[in-house]
Image (cartoon, rainbow, N blue to C red):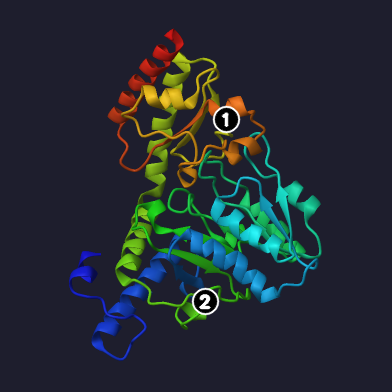
Amino acid sequence: MDDYLESGAGNPHARENRTGWRAAEALDHARRSVAALIGARPECLVFTSGATEADNLAILGLAAAFGDWPGSHHALVSAIEHPAVRGPMDQLRRRGWEVEEIPVSPAGLVDPSEIARRIQPATRLVSVMAANNEIGTRQPLTEIGALCRSRGAVLHSDAAQAAGKVPLDVGETGCGLMSLSAHKLYGPAGIGALFIAPGITLAPVLHGGAQERGLRPGTVPVMLAVGFATAAEIAQREMAEEAQRLEAYRGRLLQGLRRVCPSLVVNGTLEARLPGNLNLRFPGLPAEDLLAAAPDLMLSSGSACASGRQEPSSVLRALGLTAEEVAASIRISLGRFTTEAEIDVALERLTAAIASLDAG
């Protein structure tokens, strides 16, 4: 990225001069690398400012392509979606679409049979995230995608949390639309992408230029695209080893915490989960008190996207948890640079915090 920052990348959309050629070549390479991460063809990828914009373009762009005919369009969305998906779905409701929520099991999973039961001839769109940002549960996209194809609906998946952490293939999953974010896989903030399968038509939601197939006007930041590409290449190369290491660390941490708090409960299934995610419930111990008792640990009592809000996690509520159970839940995230020594320190700090709260 520094090379393109210091020397100036030029405009990748101005291919009639040397700096434009260089920028265009870098952007083409970036598109190939990011597309390869999800098994897509490069020409099917549109760069955006992040997964939030990609989600909006996918949902609102598809809706605009169909046209707003109140009462004639239906969409399904899972109950544990990110606000970047829930927000555009709310917009569809205001435009006269029928938007129906798909419940999840207590394990945090969408049952494809629930989609089969709710899908209609008028269902244009089904949106199910690849992996949840709070509880880390991975959804059965392949089964859902096959169902959507058989019924003529487009499957959109917000894959911001899953891409680069677990294998994803748009052909295998049957996704017609998939949203990505660079900073979720150690790339720079400010850039993402939307995969659009051949044959799917979207209308732009932003206007003023013909860049990115006319769907996303504005000059694509080459420096950020290069960073996104490099992050995707590293993730593809190291994903398997990284997942194995993080699962081992997660198991070590969970085993240690269960020794000091036998009543501990894991929110969501462990069997289909991102390798670096733990969402834990400590019955009788309010999460805010636990976090306050271990101030040097970077833990969370909810989603970073809901920071500053006081309402309980909508994801945990969708699992059927009571307000008291939600209030006793914390999220622990492990990443590429987490070490075994840090796991031991975290276990030590949490053990002390639990003991201090129990004594109080």
The residue lying at 80 percent from left, 68 percent from top is: 72
Does residue 317 appear in this view?
yes
The residue lying at 54 percent from left, 28 percent from top is: 327
Please, is residue 23 above or below residue 159 in the view?
below
Q: Most extreme residue toward the bottom, as rendered?
A: 16
Please, is residue 15 above or below residue 175 in the view?
below
Label 2 sits on what residue type?
Answer: Leu
The residue lying at 65 percent from left, 46 percent from top is: 79
Question: Quadrant location of residue 144?
Answer: bottom right
Q: Nearer the viewer, residue 31 or 67?
A: 67
Q: Which residue is mark 1?
A: 326
Q: Quadrant of the N terminus?
A: bottom left
Please, is residue 162 above or below residue 311 in the view?
below
Q: Which numbered disc covers residue 215?
A: 2
Is 44 placed left or right of 229 in the picture? Answer: right
Q: Nearer the viewer, residue 208 or 79?
A: 208
Task: Tell us which disc is closer to us: 2 or 1.
Answer: 1
